């Protein structure tokens, strides 16, 4: 906008950030839960920040993960984990982070710190999630 142009004229242009960028959706068996990944990257517009979101859903013995990363104009948001519902049957966890403190600050690359499966009670809840395209073993590029 005009304010950004005026700031640039007097030498105070915000520097464009480089951010991790990509998206992934996968359905796996809960026993394969600890996943790691790599992403591509992109250079953001001046004033934009880096974001990452992860949604984890466990339904019985299946685990569904949706991940997005990239540039955003949204305000900074400290990394936060929300447990929307915990089992038995179905568990839902989301993670959101928006940052501008350094290049590639949206650097989450594993589920290890996000997910602790609920205890297995031996019950099966609801319908199974539809099978999706799975990740290959080990690190996966986006």
Image: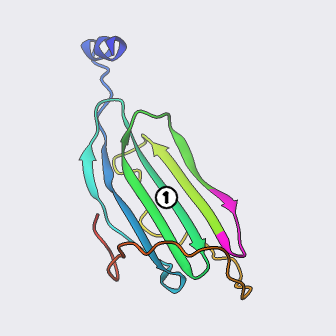
Classed neighbour count for the residue bearing mark 1: other residues with Cα under 10 Å, few (<14), some (14–19), many (≥20):
many
Direction from residue 123 to residue 131 in the image, left or right? left
Percent x, y of residue 50: 39, 44
Q: Is residue 80 left or right of residue 37?
A: right
Question: In which quadrant of the rendered view does residue 99 lie?
Answer: top left
Q: Is residue 18 above or below residue 116?
A: above
Side of 100 relative to 61 (left or right): left
Q: Is residue 11 left or right of residue 65?
A: left
Q: Is residue 114 visible?
A: no
Which residue occupies 41% across, 65% down?
A: 109
Residue at image point 50% right, 34% down? 75
Instruction: In this rendered view, identify the residue nearer to me: 95 or 130.
Output: 130
At 30% from the left and 32% from the top, the residue drawn is: 15
Q: Is residue 86 magenta?
A: yes
The answer to whether residue 18 shows anywhere in this view is yes
Q: Vertically, is 43 above or below 4?
A: below
Where does the magenta region start and end? 82-90
Q: Residue at x 72, y 76 (%)?
A: 88
Q: Please tell me whether mark 1 sits on a helix, a strand or a loop.
A: strand
Question: Which residue position holds label 1?
Answer: 54
**Residue 72 at x, y percent in the picture:** 39, 38
Q: Position of residue 11 (x, y in %)?
A: 27, 18
**Magenta-span inclusion, residue 77:** no
Q: Quadrant of residue 66?
A: bottom left
Figure quadrant of the C terminus: bottom left
The residue nearer to you, when weighing 9 against 131, is: 131
Q: Give the image location of residue 1, x and y in percent.
A: 33, 16
């Amino acid at each position: 906008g005009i304010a950004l142009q005026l700031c640039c004229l007097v030498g105070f242009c915000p520097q464009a950030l480089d951010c991790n960028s990509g998206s992934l959706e996968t359905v796996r068996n809960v026993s394969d839960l600890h996943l790691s990944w790599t992403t591509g990257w992109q250079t953001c517009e001046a004033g934009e920040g880096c974001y990452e979101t992860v949604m984890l859903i466990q339904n019985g013995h299946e685990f569904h993960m949706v991940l997005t990363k990239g540039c955003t104009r949204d305000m900074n948001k400290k990394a936060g984990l929300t447990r929307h519902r915990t089992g038995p049957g179905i568990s839902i966890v989301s993670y959101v982070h928006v940052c501008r403190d350094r290049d590639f600050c949206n650097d989450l690359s594993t589920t290890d710190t996000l997910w602790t499966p609920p205890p297995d009670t031996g019950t099966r809840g609801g319908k199974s999630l539809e099978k999706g395209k799975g990740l290959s073993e080990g690190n996966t590029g986006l």
